[in-house]
Image (spheres, rainbow, N blue to C red):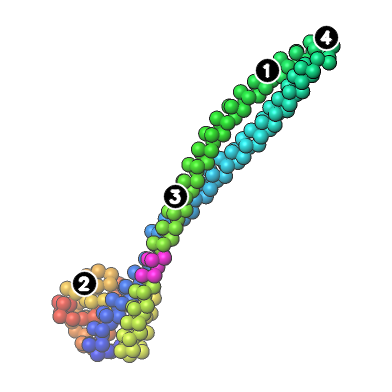
Amino acid sequence: MKADPAVQRRLLDLARVDAELSRVTHRRRTLPEVAEIAEAEKQLRVKQDALTTVETSLGDLDREVGRQETEIEQVRAREDRDRKLLQGGSVGAKQLTDLEHELATLGRRRGALEDDLLELMERREAVEADVQHARVELDKAQEALADAARRRDAALADLESTEAKRDAERASLTGQFPEPLLALYDRVRAHKGIGAALLQSRRCGACRIELDRSAFAHVKESAADEVLQCEECGAIMVRTGESGL
């Protein structure tokens, strides 16, 4: 294949644009923010589970406190009833003794219930503090996720902007090449990643392998408009004053 040397040199501009497009594609696939988001989502689930656990415990304690308070009120109501009977003076001696005994029993029962209630309230206070802490931690996890998502979106927007500019630049460049040359370039690029590179100091700019004596002699003997490919990687070798010919 033959192509004007000046046209071949413009392949370096196309290769530069394509290299940047490849970097954009790689960057999009390997954004660190994507990994951050995955970790942030994992931490968010952990914090949500932690909050659910302590809120469940708080709910259980609230119900237990409610039951304890109800039982205490029931005991107090019985105490009030017995005291009224005693104060009414209408009970016999045996019933009087029974009422006094029951009041003593109710008093002990109420005391035990109130002690239990105090312990429950202390436990509830501690769990409520855990709930507040868990909510703060959940808020932090949500903000960390939102921050990572914002940074990812900003990085993607920047990449999309760069990609659009390079796509436009590529479109303006491709029209400058003969169809056979461009097809060869695209085919090599699709298989090897780099379609064309500068031959610099006897070294292929694509694979960085130095040409052996025979291959270099062939390059030197070739006409300037001959399209040459690297024997190692297949890239079109663009010759300039830096090629050492």
Q: Position of residue 220 (x, y in %)?
A: 18, 82
Q: Residue at x 44, y 58 (%)?
A: 146
Instruction: Give the Cα distance between marks 2 and 4.
Output: 121 Å
| Residue closest to the eye, 216 or 113 | 113
Per the picture, the main secondary structure of the magenta-coloured stretch is helix
Mark 3 lies on residue: 140
Mark 4 lies on residue: 93
**Amino acid at the residue labelled 2:** Arg
**Amino acid at the residue labelled 3:** Lys
Mark 3 lies on a secondary structure that is: helix
Instruction: Give the Cα distance between marks 4 and 3.
Output: 70 Å
Instruction: Give the Cα distance between marks 3 and 1.
Output: 48 Å
**Amino acid at the residue labelled 4:** Ala
Mark 2 lies on residue: 203
Q: Quadrant of the N terminus?
A: bottom left
| Residue closest to the eye, 83 or 120 | 83
Q: Is residue 50 above or below residue 145?
A: above
Q: Are marks 4 and 3 in contact (CB under 8 Å)?
A: no
Q: Residues within 10 Å of mark 3 (few under 14, many from 20)?
A: some
Mark 1 lies on a secondary structure that is: helix
Q: Is residue 54 left or right of residue 232?
A: right
Mark 2 lies on a secondary structure that is: strand
Q: Between tags 2 and 4, which lies in front?
A: 4
- Identify the mark nearer the N-term, 4 or 3: 4
Q: Position of residue 109 (x, y in %)?
A: 69, 20
Choose top left, top right, bottom left or bottom right for residue 226.
bottom left
Q: Residue at x 73, y 21 (%)?
A: 79
Q: Between tags 4 and 3, which lies in front?
A: 4
Q: Quadrant of the C terminus?
A: bottom left
Magenta region includes residue 154: yes
**Amino acid at the residue labelled 1:** Arg
Choose top left, top right, bottom left or bottom right for residue 191.
bottom left
